[in-house]
Image (cartoon, rainbow, N blue to C red):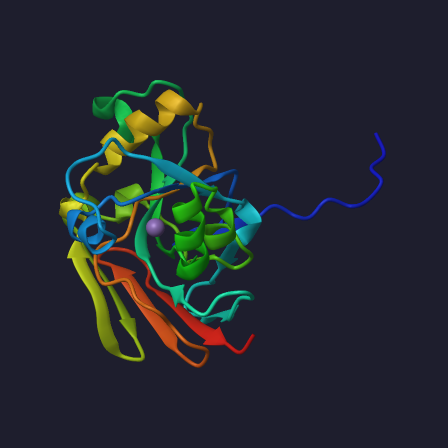
Amino acid sequence: MSLIFTPPAPTTLPIVGRDERFPVRRVFCVGRNYAEHAKEMGFTGREAPFFFMKPADALLVVESGQTGHMAYPSLTRDLHHEIELVVAIGTGGTHIRAEDAMQHVFGYAVGLDMTRRDLQSDMKKQGRPWEIGKAFEQSGPIGPLTPAAQAGDISKAAIWLQVNGQERQRSDISKLIWNIAETIEHLSSAWTLAPGDLIFSGTPEGVAAVQAGDTLEGGVSGLAPLKVAIDAP
Ligand code: MN
C-alpha cells in the first residue's frame, strides 16, 4: 500500500524506569468530577459522569525532568489550568465492571486539561460542542507515566498545582465523585476501551487563568511531576 503523504508518528509517553514508550490511542476526559470544582462551575449534586475528548496529537508530552513549553493559544483571553490525574489503559475491554477495572490500568501520569474557558462558556451557553475550548493543539500537557505497581495507593494520593510557586489547586484523589474504577466502568459501557487510551479524570477546585510567562508545576503524590511554561503566542 502506498500513502499519499507520510502519516505523523504516534504520540508516545515516556514510562518511568523503562526504555519503551507508551503509544497513545485516544484521550478521554471526565467533566466535573470533584464536588468543589462542580460548585465553582455552577453545578451541585452527583450527576452521571460525562465525557469529552482531546485528539492524541493535542497532548504536549513533557519528558522526565524537563519543562514543557506551551504557546499561549489563539482566540482566548481566559486560558485556564486544570490539574488532573491521568489514567493509562493497558488492557482494553467493553462493559468492564468496577471491581475488575483496576486490572485494565497500565499506569498513571500528571496532566493539565488546559481550557479556553471563554470559548467553552460561549459554546455551553449556545448548547454547542466544546472542542474549541478543550481540544486545541497543546491543550493537554502530560508528564511521564508511572506504572501502577510503582505508583502506590493512588486512590488516596494528594493532587496539587502551583503557578509561579504559589498554590492554586490542592485536593485528594479520594475526593473524586466517580473514582477511577467507576469511571472505567461508565466509559467502557459507551466505548470499547483499548490499550493506549488515556483518561483525564477531572480537576479539583481552584481553576483560574494563566498568562504568558507563567510557570505551572503540578503533581500527584507517587507520580513523576509535571512542569510547563506558558510562552508568548
Ligand atoms: Mn478537566
Q: Count up the numbered dots.
A: 0
- The residue closer to the viewer here, 14 or 97, is 97
**Residue 19 visible (yes or no):** no
Which part of the image, by quadrant, shows the C terminus? Answer: bottom right
Give how far across and how far down residue 43 sits, in percent: 21, 46
Give how far across and how far down residue 13 sits, in percent: 48, 51
Give how far across and how far down residue 68 sits, in percent: 47, 68
Q: Is residue 132 above or below residue 45?
A: below
Specify the quadrant of the image occupied by residue 100: top left
Residue 172 as seen in the image, left or right of residue 198: left
- The residue closer to the viewer here, 83 or 104, is 83
Furthest residue toward front: 126
**Residue 6 visible (yes or no):** yes
- At 38% from the left edge and 72% from the top edge, which residue is drawn? 210
Give how far across and how far down residue 140 sits, in percent: 45, 55
- The residue closer to the viewer here, 178 or 17, is 178
Q: Is residue 20 above or below residue 97?
A: below
- The residue closer to the viewer here, 107 or 18, is 107
- At 45% from the left edge and 48% from the top edge, which residue is drawn? 123
Specify the quadrant of the image occupied by residue 95: top left
Residue 172 as seen in the image, left or right of residue 135: left
Q: Is residue 180 above or below residue 121?
A: above
Residue 5 as seen in the image, left or right of residue 8: right
Furthest residue toward top: 95
- At 73% from the left edge and 44% from the top edge, which residue is drawn? 7
- At 43% from the left edge and 27% from the top edge, which residue is drawn? 193
Which part of the image, by quadrant, shows the N terminus? Answer: top right
